[in-house]
Every structure is written in structure tokens, then in C-alpha cells.
Image (tube, helix red, strand yellow):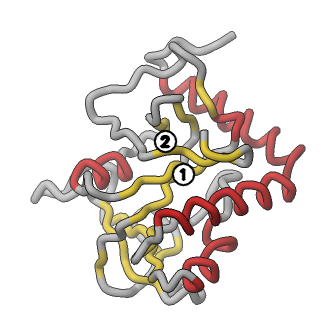
Amino acid sequence: MLPAPDDRDALRRQLLAERERFVSRAGTAAQEQLEVHLREVLAQVEPQTLGLYWPVRHEFNAVGSLVAFARSLEAAVALPFCTRGPREADDGTPGMHYRGWDGGEPRVRDACGLPSADGRAVVPDVVLVPCLGFTGDGFRLGYGAGFFDRWLGVHPHVTAVGVAWSVARLGAGRFVPQPHDQPLTFVVTEDGVA
């Protein structure tokens, strides 16, 4: 039974279970295919600074796959750093920023407990955005904290590349974007640009 389009929590649970099953089946082959497609896309968009993300919950491992490639494009890399809970800071900033990263072992953890960089704050021109689910018109479903949506809302000029497994694609009517949801430039899966 499919969750109602407005029941995002049920949809998240369903998508997490589907993603876990997919990765246990497709594993390394899907990771390699997605890496190939992301390399092609990144070579075309030519980032000066590439915002990566630290993988959790069976997400594509962009950190392990793309740091050396970004460097071959002469792009700097950065990791997100969440400064507080899911709410915006008192001054209206999105609660997340990117920090320049040398590609080595992360030396700090952010407020969400994720490994991050201790470099200076930067604004990448291209960011990879993990998707729990995504629609054909480029909207994503994340984990619900809103960090990426708020950051993208403040930085609309950035090329936002959604990264997802093909099983995360949501058919018509399964996800209704809300006003705070920010569209991605495009989404890349192991099958190519979606």
C-alpha cells in the first residue's frame, strides 16, 4: 500500500526500506555506475568548488568516489557543516554551511554528528544533494530536517545535483512539493541523468 502524498514520514520509511533492499542487491555495481554518470556530469558543469556530503543510510558514497576526480578537474571540495538543530539560526541563516575540505580524514563533527571539515566557510558553485526520493520535475524528499532546502533557498545560483538510486524515483502523485521545497537542477542515478 502506498502512503498518502502528504504523509512524508510514511513515505520516508518506505523509501529507506526500498533503498536498503536495492543496495543489498545491486551494491558495488550500482555504486560504480552512479560514479561514472556523476563524473560525466561534473566534467560538463566544471565546478570550481564542489560541495559533497557525508554518506549515511545506504546513500551513494560521493566522498569516497569523487574527491580525487574533483581535484583532477582542479576543483576544490567542501563538506556541509550543520550548526544547530533543524531550525534556522536566529539571524535567518539556514543552519548549514559548507567548509573547505582537504579530502583527508575529517577532524570535526557537526551538530548532527556527521563528519565534516574544519576549513573556512565557502559557497560551492556545484553541490551534490542526497535524495531519499525524487520526482521527475526535480523535487527531492530528504530526511525532513530541511538543511539542504534552506541552504539552496539562500543560494539559488548554485547548480544542485541530486544524487539518488533509481528506486527513489517517485511516480506522479506520490510526492507533492511544499512551498519550502527547492527544485534541483537535475538528478543523477545509476541509470544516468533522470
Residue at 26% of width from left, 52% of height from top? 156
Residue most extreme to the front:
44
Residue at 57% of width from left, 59% of height from top? 41
- Residue 108 visible in rendering: no
State whether residue 24 is above or below residue 135: below
- Disc 2 element: loop
Place of residue 123 in the rendered image (x, y in percent of width and height, measured from the top left):
30, 71
Judging by the rendered image, the residue that carries numbered circle 2 is: 142
Label 1: how many residues lie within 10 Å, few (<14), some (14-19) or many (20+)?
A: many
Place of residue 179 in the rendered image (x, y in percent of width and height, measured from the top left):
26, 29
Picture quarter with the C terminus: top right
- Residue 169 visible in rendering: yes
Picture quarter with the N terminus: top right
In the visual, does 145 lie left or right of 72? left
Q: Amino acid at mark 1?
A: Pro
- Disc 1 element: strand
Foreground: disc 2 or disc 1: 1
Judging by the rendered image, the residue that carries numbered circle 1 is: 130
Place of residue 129 in the rendered image (x, y in percent of width and height, measured from the top left):
49, 54
| Residue 149: numbered disc | none
